[in-house]
Amino acid sequence: MGVILKALRGKSVLTVSDMDGFTSQGGMIQLVELENRISIRINPDSIEKGKLRVSSKLMQIAQIEKTEE
């Protein structure tokens, strides 16, 4: 996963996955199952680096996660 995310870093490509730790490793949006519901985690730093924008409504319902350094 890390190789793909590194190759896409800084490019305007939305990355979405359900893999554990996706947003903490630099992915933009991660789908997570919590209590039999799908939840969304967003890494705003990765989205900004990709020159993309997320709606404020989506940001309100999402969990915010930063990239691990």
Image (cartoon, grey):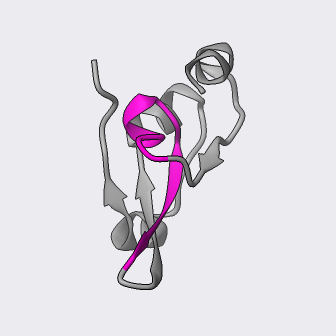
For the N terminus, which image quadrant? top right
Q: Is residue 7 left or right of residue 45?
A: right
Residue 14 point in image, percent of width and height: 67, 42
State the residue at coordinates (53%, 50%): 29
State the residue at coordinates (41%, 57%): 41
Q: Inspect the magenta stretch and tell me whether residue 27 lies in it.
A: yes
Q: Toward the viewer: 45 or 26? A: 26
Above or below, 31 against 66 in this view is below
- Quadrant of the image occupied by residue 51: top right
Residue 67 point in image, percent of width and height: 34, 30
The boundaries of the magenta stretch are: 20-34
Above or below, 57 against 19 in this view is below
Q: Is residue 28 left or right of residue 41?
A: right
State the residue at coordinates (60%, 40%): 52
Above or below, 57 against 45 in this view is below
For the C terminus, which image quadrant? top left
Residue 38 point in image, percent of width and height: 49, 76
Above or below, 27 against 19 in this view is above
Q: Toward the viewer: 60 or 7? A: 7
Single out the residue that lies furthest toward the bottom. Answer: 36
Q: Toward the viewer: 47 or 38? A: 38
* Number of callouts: 0
State the residue at coordinates (43%, 29%): 25
Residue 48 point in image, percent of width and height: 48, 33
- Quadrant of the image occupied by residue 18: bottom right
Q: Inspect the magenta stretch and tell me whether residue 59 lies in it.
A: no
